[in-house]
Image: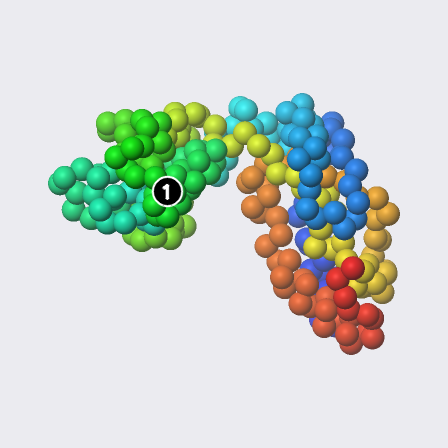
Amino acid sequence: MSSQAYITSLITQELNRNKTNPGWRGHGIDVRRNQFSLTPDLREQVQEVGRQHGCHTCLTRLEIDSDQPWVGDHIPPTKLTARDKAKIMGPFWRGKIYLYPQCHECSHQQSAIVDALKRGRMRFETLKRRQKELIGAVRADGADRVRSSGPKVTADEAQAIQDVGVREGCHSCGTRYPVTTYHADHSFPQEFCTSYMEAVFKNLGLEYPDTFDLRPQCPRCSGHQGGKIKQIRDEAMKYATAQRLPVYKF
């Protein structure tokens, strides 16, 4: 396969990976081509479209879908000191660490508490009940869990946690839905919104858009998207250099 055919194939596959479902009835939020850092107002506009119409890729409505990616929460949190871990697990803790399903909102809140404990801005003894729930010091008896093999969640552990999450919900707050916030997805991938990529598109005879917008996307579709972006970027730069096209970001 020639270099031209190869880079064309990579780009086309990536664009097809993120097409808007023809059954989606929402609308995009206009955005400047190079506006990668989004304002709170833009994000809220995207959320409102998502609440009305769901994910533009798969039509998922987050408020009724428990089968989104749950966070695999290590209990006790791996970043805490051994002393605080023992306080969380009780006096007979033998060093075992377990994974529980946790929603994204609780995961964000937990991260802030763990960071504060690590930095000495909080002490375990002064935590409120809700804060202890978030780091696993207060848990429902008999809740399903997965034995952790280490600080990084493996593929098998992640799948097991998704199954538990769908059945049991978040171990910290009990919600049945792991996420409530849609990702703001650049409907034309933002990695392609560069001057050199525009030149590559034109050189390859591919259509380059003249308008850009944001659309709500569920975390699952967002995670599936963009797996080959680095490879595409590297190959596009090599192709641009070979074709004597200027290579710079904007």
Task: Point out the image quarter for the C terminus.
Answer: bottom right
Q: Residue at x 31, y 32 (%)?
A: 127
Badge 1 crowding class, 10 Å Cα cut-off, few under 14, some 14 to 19, many 20 or more, is few
x, y percentage for residue 196?
79, 63
Q: Quadrant of residue 28?
A: top right
x, y percentage for residue 151?
34, 52
Of residue 125 and residue 155, the one placed in the foreground of this image is: 125
Q: Residue at x 73, y 43 (%)?
A: 187
Task: Point out the image quarter for the N terminus.
Answer: bottom right
- In this picture, residue 97 sits left or right of residue 188: left
The answer, for residue 99, to whether it is visible in the render is no
- In this picture, residue 142 sits left or right of residue 79: left
Q: Amino acid at mark 1?
A: Arg
The answer, for residue 131, to whether it is visible in the render is yes
Of residue 131 and residue 196, the one placed in the foreground of this image is: 131
Position of 173 relative to 248 (above/below): above
Numbered label tally: 1
- In this picture, residue 146 sits left or right of residue 240: left
Q: Residue at x 13, y 40 (%)?
A: 92
x, y percentage for residue 210?
86, 47
Position of 222 relative to 151 (above/below): above
x, y percentage for residue 13?
69, 54
Label 1: element kind: loop
Q: Quadrant of residue 106?
A: top left
- In this picture, residue 161 sits left or right of residue 242: left
Label 1, on which residue? 121
